[in-house]
């Protein structure tokens, strides 16, 4: 059983640790040459640097994952991203990124007061294991009923319906938020038809 987690997207690969922070990480006495042991401040700086480096590495791995399997995707730092990792059989530390590989991901993009689910992606070698459903169930607590949308490929409608998303009939497009419709018209085409779906409460049976 794989376990989804939230990815830290607050620090991207464009935000590199400062020279001073790197110096502290390499040499804890860099800010206090006379100290024989790292002070509490220095230890805090080391932990902060390690956290930044870990976030940068995770973000780079995510971008590589999408570049390899969904090259048209464009990631944004403001998005919330949930991922599923595969821990290599030789690994013993589930927090060590060197022992992990991203095998599935999904993104929540804020659009004004609304949410847009996008980028649901499962590595080809890991499909058929219900990872998409696991991700959708994992992010469900963050989603807002009737304010959350997605653009589905026709063959994925059933997957989303099981998670309480409902197909929006074209006759109801005029009542949808302008921001959502603008994005839909940008992504939808005859060559790549998409279906607008909206999250509803579990007991709701019609739009």
Image (cartoon, rainbow, N blue to C red):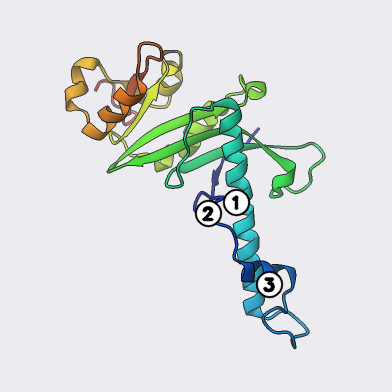
Q: Earlier in the sequence, mark 3 or mark 1?
A: 3
For residue 98, what is the image quadrant? top right
**Image-based side of 120 in relation to 171, left or right:** right
34 over 6 or under it: above or below:
below
Horizontal and vertical percent position of residue 45 = 62, 71
Q: Quadrant of residue 183?
A: top left
Of residue 132 and residue 191, the one placed in the foreground of this image is: 191
Q: Position of residue 39 (x, y in %)?
A: 68, 81
Tag 2's secondary structure? loop
Query: Dot 2: few (<14), some (14–19), or many (≥20) neighbours within 10 Å?
Result: some
Distance CA(mark 2)–CA(mark 1): 6 Å
Disc 2: which residue: 11
At 63% from the left edge and 56% from the top edge, which residue is drawn?
Answer: 53
The residue singled out by tag 1 in the image is 56
Instruction: Give how far apart the Cα atoms at labels 3 and 1 are.
Output: 18 Å
Picture residue at 67% right of the left edge, 22% below the top: 125
Q: Between 149 and 191, which is closer to the camera in this rendering?
A: 191
- The quarter of the image holding the C terminus is top left
Q: Above or below — where is 88 with respect to 157?
A: below
Q: Earlier in the sequence, mark 3 or mark 2?
A: 2
Residue 154 or 164: which is nearer the viewer?
154
The residue furthest bottom is: 34
Residue at 29% x, 36% y is 147
Callout 3 touching callout 1 (CB < 8 Å): no
Query: Element type at marker 3?
Result: helix
- Residue located beneath label 3 in the image: 24
Q: Up-down: is 102 above or below 170?
A: below
Give the secondary structure at mark 1: helix
The single residue placed furthest to the left in the displayed view is: 174
Mark 2 / mark 1, whichever is N-terminal: 2
Q: Are marks 2 and 1 in contact (CB under 8 Å)?
A: yes
């Amino acid at each position: 059983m794989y376990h989804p987690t939230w990815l830290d997207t607050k620090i991207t690969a464009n935000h590199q640790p400062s020279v001073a922070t790197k110096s502290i990480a390499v040499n804890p006495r860099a800010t206090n040459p006379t100290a024989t042991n790292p002070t509490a401040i220095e230890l805090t700086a080391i932990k902060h640097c390690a956290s930044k480096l870990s976030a940068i590495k995770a973000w780079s791995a995510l971008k590589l994952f999408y570049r390899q399997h969904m090259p048209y995707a464009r990631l944004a730092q403001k998005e919330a991203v949930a991922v599923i990792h595969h821990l290599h059989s030789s690994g013993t530390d589930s927090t060590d990124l060197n022992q992990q590989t991203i095998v599935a991901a999904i993104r929540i993009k804020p659009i004004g007061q609304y949410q847009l689910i996008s980028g649901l992606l499962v590595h080809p070698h890991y499909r058929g294991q219900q990872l998409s459903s696991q991700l959708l169930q994992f992010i469900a607590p963050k989603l807002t009923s009737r304010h959350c949308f997605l653009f589905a490929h026709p063959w994925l409608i059933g997957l989303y319906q099981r998670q309480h998303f409902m197909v929006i009939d074209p006759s109801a497009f005029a009542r949808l938020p302008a921001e959502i419709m603008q994005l839909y018209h940008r992504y939808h085409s005859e060559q790549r038809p998409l279906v607008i779906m909206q999250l509803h409460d579990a007991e709701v049976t019609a739009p």
